[in-house]
Image: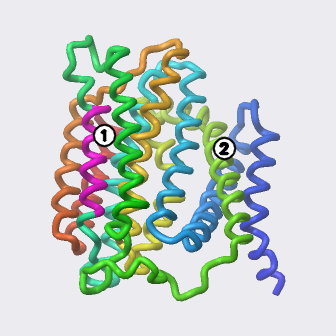
Amino acid sequence: MALRRVGSWLPIGVPLLAALTLVLAWGTKPGLGLAVLLAVILGATVLVAVRHAETVAHRVGEPLGSLILAVAVTVIEVGLILTLSAGGGEHAATLARDTVFSAFMITTAGVVGLSILVGAIRFGTVRFNSEGSGAALATLSTLAVLCLVLPDFTETSGPLFSPSQLAFAAIASLVLYVLFVVTQTISHRRFFLPVTDSGQAPPEDADEEHAAPPTLRATLVSGVLLLVSLAAVVGLAKLESPSIEGAVVALGLPESVVGVIIALVILLPESISAVRAARRNHIQTSLNLGLGSAMASIGLTIPAVAVASVWMPHQLVLGLGQTQIVLLLLSIVVSILTVVPGRATTLQGGVHLVLFAAFLFLSVSP
């Protein structure tokens, strides 16, 4: 009974503890002991954030639930990128690029691949709506190539956009993202709903879960605690960043690994939610989270850093290196071949995860 009471208070207590720890530790340079404590609190906060996100998603339904989590995490991600970039440092100019590219690879290769693999192992062949996932992938591919590949091929010297080119990329990114959100939530919502065993989307009023949806009060409480948890995750990650950067330097790893680690931490809530959805045979929800997170990461981050670059002391580098371009384009091609049939097996999941492993390996050993 006592354990049950403690468990019932954890979803409330952990975000508040994380926020209090963040306030008390802010502005300090964590030693080894404090860094370990922050890491433990950070992990617990991520798990609690997943629980609150699923509560909100259950109340509002798909695909709005996935969209809420993707946008919430991305807004916090933007804040972290801007905060770290404003702090200067040699890698500040490329931090946005490294983090956004890492988010793209983590979601399209890692989250999507693991979700398909988990679902296929449990249910054999998993099904999803190729119309909605295809639309998401087309938008995502355009955003990624326009913002991360095109700068290397303009007449501007180096992997940089000119001010007018950067403004165009920012506006185009925002327009594409808004168009996709309208399509996903209003005009063609059925394309993004989980499909039945026959491969057809269920009625829009079909309840995904057998359990009754949470009350409005519980949903509002979870929504507030979700925001507190996400803010705490980003703040704790920022406190941990000096330790991370020190470890990266001590190990002789490329500075871009910092962006990879930041993206991994920030995307943990969505990744866990996607895998849990896959275990319930809701692969469409997993794809909504994976592709939607990558799209929000580019569509919202690039406009934000473009505006912030006016006040930054360094130029904003968006163009990827040759190895990164190959991985990005290969990820797009593999994702297209996975999405088009509207169904997948363990093979597709394995292909995505091998691509994710290649991304991680080449990040530490370029």
In the figure, is residue 347 to the left or right of 216?
A: left
- Three-letter amino acid code of the residue under disc 2: Leu
In the figure, is residue 129 to the left or right of 270?
A: left
Instruction: Say which residue label 1 marks.
Output: 143
The answer to whether mark 1 and mark 2 are in CB contact below 8 A is no
Q: Residue 199 in the image: state x and y as whole percent.
A: 25, 80
**In the foreground, 363 or 71:** 71
How crowded pointer 2 is (Cα within 10 Å; few <14, some 14-19, many 20+) is rated as many
Task: Give the position of the C terminus as an image quadrant.
Answer: top left
Q: Residue at x 56, y 29 (%)?
A: 82
Q: Residue 256 in the image: state x and y as whole percent.
A: 41, 32
Q: Residue at x 49, y 63 (%)?
A: 64
Q: Residue 58 in the image: state x and y as whole percent.
A: 56, 73
Instruction: Say which residue label 2 marks.
Output: 236
> Of marks 1 and 2, which one's residue comes earlier in the chain?
1
- Quadrant for residue 98, please give it: top left
Question: Residues in magenta?
Answer: 132-148
Disc 1 element: helix
How crowded pointer 1 is (Cα within 10 Å; few <14, some 14-19, many 20+) is rated as many
Position of 332 relative to 271 (above/below) = above
